Amino acid sequence: MKNKILFIEDQEDLGNVVKQYLEISGFDVTWCTNGSKALKTFTANANSFDLLIIDIQLPGMNGFEIAELIAKEKENIPFLFLTARNEKKDRLHGLKIGADDYITKPFDIDELVLRIKNIIKRNSHHITPEKEIPTADIQIGDIILHKELLKLSIKNATPISLTLREAELLEFLWKNQNRVLKREEILLQLWGENDYFLGRSLDVFISRLRKLLHTSKSVSIDNVYGIGFIFNVKKI
């Protein structure tokens, strides 16, 4: 079965070229030229898309706004930004929204296809078969990671929602607690790549997990300058 992609791009020439090349590469592509049409298309077929490619500079609402609205419709849907905007603040904003990648124009079409395949591959193993028994919650000091629900509880407080990547990272840190973890080791073992975008993503995820864990008395994440991080778990 072909992976389905929702492609949001208002430039006719570029849109035609990318759509045709992706289809030649084995994808089923639905192309929308504005945010309003894209939202209607996604809402009507939310469970059928495997990935979204979103241009940022669109007529009406921009790509960031579209991504946030779509994420509310279906959490953890993989998406990447394809844009001419190359400013640091835009990249960081895209990461905070939850983008899996951020590709600037002009770009190599073969590289785009490879990145799409990598994203879909990374996310495919998170689909749980109907008969599979859900994984038990993970107790880490005074916190609980609810893996299947993508939530984090601290001291029996109201559970806090996590993104899929944040939950993956927290579980990986727990499995490697109380030892120095190199950034490269985390990226390669957890997501299979060590590139600029994933490196910046890791910083964003670590920063948010720190904020979520600030009330914990037994769990913390420390920087090891120039090397990586250490996930501290104290007995309580």
Image (spheres, helix red, strand yellow):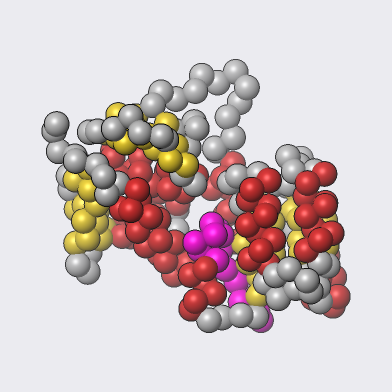
Horizontal and vertical percent for residue 26? 76, 53
Using residue 213 as the reference point, say whether residue 201 is left or right of it: right
Name the residue at 57% across, 54% down: 118
Q: Which residue occupies the foreground of this view, 208 or 223? A: 208
Q: Does the magenta stretch include residue 197?
A: no
Q: Which residue is drawn at 19% across and 67% down?
A: 225
Residue 201: x percent and y percent?
44, 61
- Picture quadrant of residue 168: top left
172 over 39 or under it: above or below: above
Say which residue appears at 54% left-offset and 74% top-offset.
90
Which residue is farthest front?
157
- 221 left or right of 42? left
Q: How many marks?
A: 0
Verify whether residue 97 appears in magenta: yes
The quadrant the C terminus occupies is top left
| Magenta region, residue range | 94-108
- Asked whether 117 or 135 is in front, the reply is 135
Residue drawn where x is 50% and y is 63% of the image: 95
Q: Is residue 174 left or right of residue 197?
A: left
Residue 210 appears in view:
yes
Above or below, comparing residue 18 to residue 192 in the picture: below
Residue sitting at the far left: 235
Q: Is residue 112 visible?
A: no
Quadrant (top left/top right/bottom left/bottom right) for the N terminus: top right
Residue 69 position within the rendered picture, expressed as x and y whole percent measured from the top left: 67, 54
Query: Looking at the image, which is closer to me, 108 or 33?
Result: 33
Q: In the picture, residue 144 is in which quadrant?
A: top left
